[in-house]
Image (tube, coloured by chain):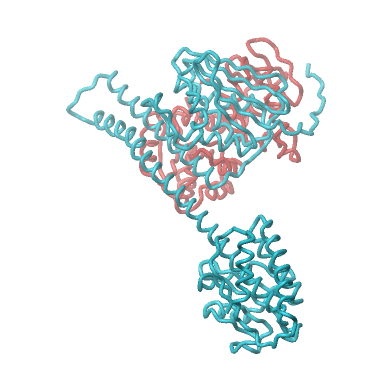
Chain colours: A red, B cyan
Amino acid sequence: MLDKLAKILVVDDEPQIRRLLRVSLTAHQYQVSEAISGKEALAAAASESPDLMLLDLGLPDEDGLAVIRQLREWSHLPVIVLSVRSHEKDKISALDLGANDYVDKPFSMGELLARIRAALRQKIQSEGLEPVFHCGALTIDFTKRQVAVGGQEIKLTPKEYDLLRVLAVKAGRVLTHSQLLREVWGEEYRDDTQYLRVYIGQLRQKIEENPSLPQYILTESGVGYRMRVFS
Amino acid sequence: MVQIKKIKKGMISPVFIFFSAALFAAAVYLITQARSQVSASQEREARMAFLYSLIREIAVSVKLENAFQVIAKRIGEMFHCNLILFVSENSLLFQKAEYPSQIKMSESDYAKAVWAFQNNKPAGCHTNFFSGSEWFFFPLEVEGEPVGILSLNLQANDGIISSQQDGFLDATVSQLGIVIERASHLKVIEQARLLNEARKLETTLLSCISHDFRTPISSILGASAALLDEEARYDLASQKELLFTIQEEAERLNRFVSNLLDMMKLQSGLKLNQEWVEFQDLLGSSLSRLSNLLSDRHLVVALEPNLPMLFLDFVLFEHVLLNLLDNAVKYSEPGTTIWIKAYKKEERIFVEITDEGVGIPLLEQRSVFQKFYRIKETARPNAGTGLGLSICKGIVEAHGGKISAKSLSSGKGVSMVIELPAGTEISYSLEKEKQYA
């Protein structure tokens, strides 16, 4: 696997968290380098050419958000933010500034690894897309605009299809409400979350076996939605 | 100096009126002007009438600030002059009322008011202090302690105060003192109540932290020390067990901390981030967070079709569902059923979470929503912080809803019922789309 060689830059001021990440990521065959401040992080991002940055939002010297803002001026390096649950505003700001994803602290290693894989996959496939998307029993044929669950074709409205496609193209990665609204409905709808809620509901009725326990489109409360990746 | 005697605060009774009237007779402060020859009885009658109507007005003012305004307006109208009322809070003077509204005095005049307050002596025109000022500063006192300053701008009146006005002034000033006293007493009572509540919370919090936090911490320390012990030989299964202990206990600590944070947020006043939400979306998000916990329970979800969207804070409401579902699991046995229902009835949305667990005794069905309340009988080692349900109540009520616990006819388990206003149907039209073939 290509992503197994990936180099991850861990940015956190807490030595315990850095140690935990270093040990577990190394055990999963990632290379790990560390930075303890925003300044160090930006320097390391420039000099060590990592494949991904794990960034704690609560850094002492500068706001983690400022690091993303500065980094995005010159780099597309995938960034996963480590944030505190219930700080939804920070997460949304980080994502809008160009962070690729977030993981709530305290996190489970399994969850973190899934996010890392998704972000690295995005980096690789940023150009060429697979023509057919598979996620469990769900398949999307981008060339024919066809959607099927368990081989059974599902009829979707154009907007439903667009929404599903946007989620699938960035599968595994969280998309904020306003990112989805902008991509599917256009800039002027970016705050109309109720459209999104209705369409997500309709999509789930059509593709999920049990819409109250969705398997494909996952809700990230207060932030957005995420297409699940089956590993 | 008008002596304002301590009178039972808040009480406005005929006895009090009589008492106040008696005070005027004793009122001794003379404002240099010669009194006119109006007969004493006429004067007293007019004063009584004025005072009586004033007291009625003050009595019906719901807020004390309004009472200040009422008095300021009355005196201003009677004297045909500008006036400002200052009341002291922590030895500083604050403008509480004025006539006409919004007027202010210059900084140097304010300094004179402060002087009069600090020295507890009348100042300004007609006095020996700052006699060149347009203002007359009259200290208000309660039991010899200065509590404020009444400032009258007498420039327009050529500095004349008739004896009738003087009498009225005395009467009103005594009223003012009482109102101010009432205000300060109310404030002291309120502060005492808050302090008491804070102390109670602090004590419970401390006992909660020391007990509920120490238990998981000691298991974590114990288990990790055991794993690091080089002399002990644990087989793989035992090692796993120790690691599970660490994980479980850390998760428990994490829940406690989140609950305490929620509680603090609720106490400092919630800011709701309300948006239109599909209940199914909310429920799905909560259920998937708890999928491990719920794995050995039967889950029956019955949502009324076409349930209207709800206008609520997604994240906070998720906490409510998580807390309720967590309780449903915590107090029931594996293999039992948990029902989740949502329906609309008479413009209200109802959400019910029902379990087959130990239930809540009838007498305690209200108390369980109180902070730190735990049912003694059913207390278990895995019991929570006693905060979960009070957090739920706080969040639901912040949304204009209600939450209650109901026993079931079967006698087993409990049904937690949330009732929310259905709100207005959202006014947006979804584009009619052609079915994509």
At 51% from the left and 55% from the top, the residue drawn is B189
Is B435 left, or right, of A150 in this rendering? right
* Residue B379 percent location from the top left of the image: 39, 26
* Residue B147 percent location from the top left of the image: 55, 70
Residue A135 picture quarter: top right
Is A169 left, or right, of B141 in this rendering? right
Q: How many marks?
A: 0
With respect to residue B128, does B225 lie above or below? above
With respect to residue B406, does B36 lie above or below? below
With respect to residue B252, does B59 lie above or below? below
Q: Nearer the viewer, residue B426 or A93?
A: B426
* Residue B157 percent location from the top left of the image: 75, 83
Residue B115 picture quarter: bottom right
At 73% from the left and 73% from the top, the residue drawn is B76
Is A170 left, or right, of A5 in this rendering? right
Q: Quadrant of the N terminus of chain B?
A: bottom right
